[in-house]
Every structure is written in C-alpha cells, then in structure tokens.
Amino acid sequence: MSGMWGNKIKISIFGESHGNAIGINIDGLEPGFEIDLDKVSAEMKRRAPGRNNLSTPRKEDDEPEILSGFFEGKTTGTPLCAIIRNNNTKSKDYGKLKDIMRPGHADYTGKIRYNGFNDYRGGGHFSGRITAPLVFAGAICKQILEAKGIKIVSHIKSIGTIEDKSFLDEEITEEFINSYMSKELPLIDESKEEAMRKEILLAKEELDSIGGTVECAVVGIEPGIGNPFFDSVESTLAHLMFSIPAVKGIEFGRGFELTQIRGSQANDSMYFSGEKVLTKTNNNGGILGGITNGMPVIFKVAIKPTSSILKSQNTVNINTGEETVLEVNGRHDPCIVQRALPVIEAATAIGILDLIEN
C-alpha cells in the first residue's frame, strides 16, 4: 500500500486534509524509550500553519492525540498510533473543484487513480497537511537518534534565486544546532533573511508563489550505516523525500555540480584524526557505495512553488469535457519552503533510524 513504508521501523500514514483527523501508526520502536512531548510539540509548531504572514492563515493546533503504544511517558514497544484532529477546515471553498482540475495539484491524477472516489477537498490525502503526522513520527525518531549522538539539522538553502551558504562549506556548529529551530527562516548567512522575506511577500502580492531548496545534514552518524544498491542511504532517503508533497528533486553532497569537475576535484581526500578516518572535503555528502563514511550526511531537496495561487489559470472541467479558467480561492502559502524544514528532518530521522536498526 502507498501509505506504508519501512523495514524495521514501519510507518502507516492516514487521513485527508478536510476529514475528521489525520494520523500515523509507528511500528518497531524499542520499548521503554522516554518521549519528551514538549520537544514533539516544538517540532509540530515549526510545521504548523498560521504562524506569520509568510504562510497560510489557516490555523491548526496540530496537537497529536496518542492512542496506543505509549504508557507512563514511555514507549511500550507495541505500535504507537496518534491522530491529529482537523478543526479549521473550510470545505465549501473546494465545492466547485470537484470537476475543475487545479494545475500543479494531484486532482486529475488522483481522480484517475481512484476512479473519482478520492476526497478532493483541500487535496484530500494528497495534501501537505498529511505531513503533520509525519513530523510527529519524525520528532520521536529524532529523540531516539539524539540519544545515540546523532543530530539532524536543516536550513533554507535558497528562495527563488537568493542563495544561502552551504553546510558543505561551513562548519555545522553547536550554536547553529541549538538555535536554528527557533528561527522563522533558518539560515547560515542571516544577512540573506530580509531579501528572502521580500521575495516571498512579493510573490504573495502578485497573487503567485515561489519555491526554493532545503539543505539537510545528519551529524554524528558513524561509518558503516546503509547497504549497496537498493537499501543504500541515498535510495532510502530519496524514497522518503519524494514521499513529501512538493519535493521535485534531490542531490547528495555536491550532486549535479560533480558533473562539471574532474575526479581529482570530486574525490574527498582522506586523513586520520586520532583513530577516526575523516575526509578533507565532503563532496560526496558523507556517503560512498550507499554507506556512511563517518562525515555528516548532507543533501539538498528542491521544493516547487505552492500550486494553489490566486492568479487565473487555464484548466479543464473533467465532467463537462470543456476547457475553462480557474481562479483558486481559499487560504494558501505563498511559499512552503520554511514550513518544509521540519518535514524534511522528520523523514530523514525515520529513514536513518530504520537504517541503523537494520
């Protein structure tokens, strides 16, 4: 089934944007792990809508209600299931969209795939809202990984053509790790924030949207994690990244940039630091042969512009067979990049924990 993923750590995601609730079931968690619910709540708030004028005004508490697998503050080892109730829905905004296909959305493909029985309100099961339970699961996995000395961090690498610095060129400091979660726009070079903010608000003013990239790093991971070919670190993380709505690309380390340089420049020279083997550069993103080499795992994902825009767009009425013009109403993000960070981190945490447990 498309809603299920995992080998040792298995997740099953469910719900629709305008249904009663969305949720997730997590199987394979070790018993007796103490979950810090305040940290879980902090992760949920990072993704939640309605925080500022850079995101949709739709407000959801996004407070998970744990139904099973959690007792006296600790995991029981049995499947942990949680739901998040949908409270602030405006389904009437989507009434006319039953037959009119929104460009950039999965309305048409979902209708074809599910023979017209899919819940089309707010994108239904295809909605970015379904990433909220993913963040819940990832928040737990992040805590388990942190107990093993592994931390997952991210920053906005770009908004439109405005670029931040890269983890590949800058040291990932404890100061950054401890402070980035509290920032609206987490950046290495904070002087870029105002320009990025203006770019997002300009797109909003023009009834449009804009995309960008997110760079993520896994710090403190030991060498030897992963497998060649089908269960490689890259294939595992790529599978999860492309399960996130709006993700349209991924590259590890220097990625496509490696195609423009020589092997002598692309190869990461190795050296001893005490008994550890490290590399002077990290062009390959901490992965060789599908297996971690002890350097931070670093990758970048592309987030497309929000599909729902207020500008008029040409489309079709699937019921009448006529071409038409669509003007989307409702509450939408001019940019979802800043809200995608905790989702990217969550999916990464789930994938890395699954690889380690295997």
Image (cartoon, grey):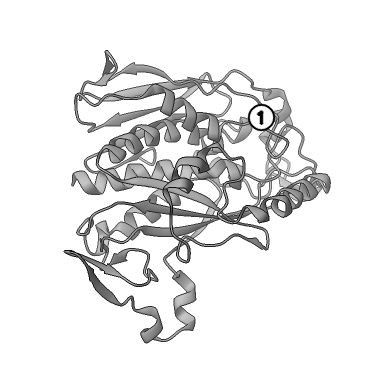
Looking at the image, residue 154 sits to the left or right of residue 223; the answer is right
Q: Which residue is mark 1?
A: 50
Picture quadrant of residue 118: top right
Q: Nearer the viewer, residue 314 or 40?
A: 40
Residue nearest the viewer, comparing 137 with 167: 167
Q: Foreground: 215 or 275?
A: 275
Residue in the foreground of this view, choosing between 340 and 319? 340
| Disc 1, SS | loop
In the image, residue 136 above or below residue 85? below
Q: Can residue 117 be spotted in the picture?
A: no
Look at the image and tell me whether residue 260 can be seen.
yes
Residue appearing at x 47%, y 66% in the figure = 169
Q: Is residue 277 above or below residue 122?
A: below
On screen, residue 20 versus residue 136, left or right, reads right
Give the residue drawn at x 44%, y 35%: 135
Q: How many marks?
A: 1
Q: Is residue 326 left or right of residue 265?
A: right
Residue at x-position 36% and y-position 52%: 218
Q: Tell me the residue at 59%/23% (across/down).
A: 60
Question: Picture quarter containing residue 123?
Answer: top right
| Residue 339 to residue 59: above or below | below
Q: Amino acid at mark 1?
A: Gly
Residue at the farthest front position = 274
**Residue 10 locus on image (x, y percent):** 28, 37
Q: Residues within 10 Å of mark 1 (few under 14, many from 20)?
A: some
| In the depicted structure, whether residue 217 falls above or below residue 71 | below
